[in-house]
Amino acid sequence: MRRRTDRVSNLAAGSIVVVLAIVATYFAFTKTNPFANPYKLHAVFDSALSNGIRPNAPVRIAGVQVGKVKEVGRGPGTTVRVTMEIQDKGLPIHADASIKARPRLFLEGNYFLELRPGTPAAPEVDDGGTVPLGRTAIPVQFDQVLDTYRADTRTSLQRFLGGLSTALKDGGDRALRANLRRAPGAFREGAVALEAARGTQDGDLAGVIREQARLNTTLDAHRIQLQGLLTGFRGTMDALASQQGALSATVPALRGLLERTPAAVTALDRTLPPLRELAVALRPGLKAAPPVLDRAPAFLTALGDLTRPGRLPALVAELRPTARTLSTLERTLPPLLNVVRPVSQCLTTRVVPILNATVPDGALTAKGRTVWQELFSLGTGLLSSQQNFGGDGYATRYSFGLGTDGVATRLPGPSNLVQIGSEETLGSRPAFRNNQSPFMPDAPCLDQPLTSLEAETAPPAGTITPVSVRRTAPLTPSQLRAQTARTNRKLRQKAGRP
């Protein structure tokens, strides 16, 4: 009977040993752990990198290898997409990370990738993230450097080197040494300028670069004009070099000019506010100028017709007597203006304000009507009052309608009033003052105070005699005149007059 055994055959054992040896050898040379899950990072480069980067190329941070290139493939458009595996010692990678491809040999050869992981303030990039094209860069190839030296560029470079050699030979070396002694101060000021060029906010430098790119594009589009400019600049420099003595004398004077410049700028700054006020004052005139300018061509055409060679002598002959008269008038105008000026000022500051004012009269104030408007109503009042004047002597009657009330005077003046009616007289405005007005004839008009239109109300005089009339119906004009005549006769008899 055969015994069963669990031993592995020699063939199977040999096979297992061979496989283990192969796996150990592979791990020893590739140093790859198939059970690991490494961090992967993608980056997009310019297409020029495709011939210089290979898989397994090292990825370094500050010279320390932290990973390797895993795959090089085609990216969006004409770009190259590079996949890298980053070890734990190279993590974390931030969103503002950047990658530069650098040559391993001088100017040419295979590349390695220099990774800058970014700033801690930026968020971290997840596994499988991508560094965009704007944050990657590639080195300049030697053939690209040589491609820039075309025929015109080589000619310009030869001229530049020749001019530099001539300048150094003709005393430029001594001037260069003198300038180098002044370099520390210039570098100090330049450092301040460069510090200011960095900007004050994020994105300032990007804006400068963007505008510089626009400038370079414009210069490239006007290459021929730029060459002419450089040629003219060379001619200018040659002319300055031929006048070195005069230029040397000009530089000290320029220093004095620069020393006086701050005071001049300060004076100019003081003139800006009046200039701004002048501009504001001129703005209405400028707005009114277009219609005037529209009519100016017709005026200039007519003036041109008058001043034509055929008409100009006759026009001058006709204007000669007028010019003589104007010359005489010019000599006589100053005395006249000296007389007229006080009158016009008096009218402007003393008369016109009174004419534009309103006479205050309490509840009877004519609102909205000025003094000059009231003066126009004076004629209407005189026409209506002429009916109250008769041939009864010096008495003047004031009729307030066709009612039973009336007021009459025996003698001129407000102190001799006679009232017909049952109601008492409240008074009159303005109150009569038998004294001199504050007007001073000998004093200049501008030295006198502005006249006040305020007036007092005078109480009724004690000599007013009220006469009651017991009549309820309104009187007719003839009845009113008859009753007034009877009242006057009674008053004359009482006063002892016939």
Image (tube, helix red, strand yellow):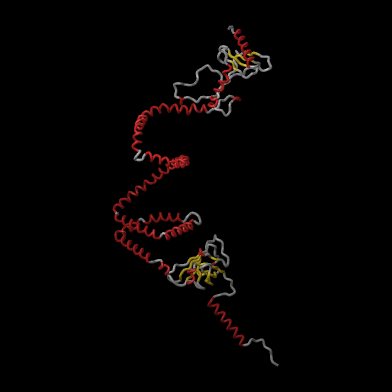
Q: 89 above or below 408?
A: below
Give the percent coordinates (x, y) of residue 91: 55, 66
Viewer can see residue 289: yes
Residue sitting nearer the eye, 58 or 258: 258
Q: Nearer the viewer, residue 21 or 54?
A: 54
Quadrant where the image shows the N terminus: bottom right
Residue 270 visible to an observer of this rendering: no
Using residue 388 as the reference point, say whether residue 244 is left or right of it: left
- Tell me residue 378's x, y (percent): 55, 23
The part of the image, by quadrant, that contains residue 313 is top left
What residue is drawn where x is 56% and y is 69%?
A: 40
Q: Depth check: 373 or 171 in front?
A: 373
Q: Is residue 482 above or below residue 377?
A: above
Give the quarter of the image for residue 319: top left
* Residue 207 rendering spot, x and y as whole percentages: 48, 57
In which quadrant of the rendered image does the C terminus lie?
top right
How many numbered tags mark residues here?
0
Figure check: 343 above or below 482: below
Farthest residue toward the bottom? 1
Image location of residue 123, percent across then percent down: 56, 61
Q: Residue furthest right?
A: 1
- The structure residue drawn at horizontal position 61% and vertical position 14%, both measured from the top left corner, is 418
Residue closest to the far front:
310
